[in-house]
Amino acid sequence: MRATYSAEFIRRIPKTDLHVHLDGSIRVSTLIELAREARVALPSETDEGLNHLVFKDCYNSLEEYLQGFKYTVAVLQTPEALERVAYEFAWDNFREGVRYFEVRFAPQLHINARQNIETVVESVNRGLARATKEFNETEAIRSGAEPEAHYAIIACAMRAFFKGMSEYYNAFLELHRFSKHKRIYHLASLELVQAMIKLRDELGIPVVALDIAGPEAGFPPHDHEDAFDLAHHNFFKKTVHAGEAYGPESIFEAITRLHADRIGHGYHLFSTELITDASIRDRERYVRNLCEYIADRRITIEVCLTSNLQTNPQIADIRRHAFQRMCEERLSVTLCTDNRTVSKTTVSREIALAIEAFDLSPGLLRDIIIYGFKRSFFPRPYREKRAYVRRVIDFYDGCAAAWGVGIQRR
């Protein structure tokens, strides 16, 4: 019999978002205000206009999907703007029951003559910390009736960058104009990791992991191997955008050469037709072995259903999404938004979509929600993480009992 879950139950259960970009999750009204202050020209100065012209329901390609970021990044070039957007982002999550998130962004996109990388990350952290403190001072949290909220920051390096993306990248390209571009991308990633080590170790900012974002085709993970080695040797976690617009080989490289603890998207994990290495003769076996490796090591896949539908129009029907097979293979998966504004979504909406499309049983839904907490890069000692996850599980089970949702295991 098909399980049913009310919207209120989905809202109340404790949730995570482990794959969400700050610059893709700015409130549209805030974007308009900040654009006016910064004199950034927008295609429209109304919520309705921007939602029609920029933040669409459907996109024709990943390239079209990414167009909105040129506006959001342009207005996030001051400490005040970064702090405000981070503060609002945190509260938008808390209001829908998200109790833990790891927000990611590329600090080097926001460096300019007025703010260095320390200012950029400190500003974001200040907004997140202020909102989290306010939320954790509410009566339900202080009384111990509900689990508190926590957050962490993931730093994104760019697979590739070009002139005009940011003042920092403009200067970086100019300073290394005699080097090959891939060498320059590699150096920028190394510089980012060095900065994050200082911010975490000397300033106590909860930067927990490194990621690479940007186009996969032509820019393989191994271009950034040295940066990820440095992160690995300094006890950072690693998550890598892989299998979003490229095949299984991208995921394989992310795991074996960048030490990925989690995979962002992973949509094309099973896409044997996208394998390009001619030496791989048995493609089905290759994918089967890769899948077993991921399952055995509990490498979690950060699934972004709405985003994948928007950037891969050929999927057409959500029921054709690889999420179904991921669950059948018993992979560790968690549901994420990717970009709350660009994809017009929330964690609650992603959960509701998965329930409707894939008929999630109570046991499977519970596993997926708890995976998000268990496989998080929680920025505090492991003993504290275990205690926190236990409080989350108890609260989830209490919600399930209150709403009459069975929690039998798979």
Image (cartoon, rainbow, N blue to C red):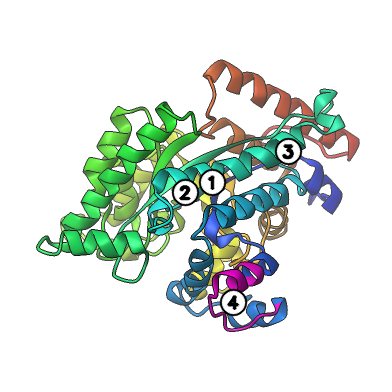
CA gap between label 1 and label 4 equals 33 Å
Mark sitting earlier along the chain (1/4): 4
Mark 3 neighbour density, 10 Å: few (under 14) some (14–19) many (20 or more): many
- In the image, which is nearer the foreground, mark 2 or mark 3? 2
Q: Which mark, by number, is residue 14?
A: 3
Q: Three-letter amino acid code at disc 3?
A: Pro
**Label 3: which secondary element:** loop
State the residue at coordinates (58%, 67%): 342
Circle 4 Cα neighbour tier, 10 Å, few/some/many (<14 / 14–19 / ≥20) = some
44 is within the stretch colored magenta = yes
Q: Choose the circle earlier in sequence order: 2 or 4.
A: 4
- Label 4 sits on what residue type? Cys
Q: CA distance from mark 3 to mark 4?
A: 29 Å
Q: What separation in Å lies between label 2 and label 4 (alpha carbons)?
A: 32 Å
The residue identified by callout 1 is: 123
Residues under numbered marks 2 and 1 in contact, where contact means CB atoms less than 8 Å apart: yes
> Which residue, given by chain and number where applicable, does mark 2 sit on?
120
Compared across the picture, whether 223 is left or right of 316 comes to left
Q: In terms of sequence position, does the residue under pointer 3 or pointer 4 come before the other?
A: 3
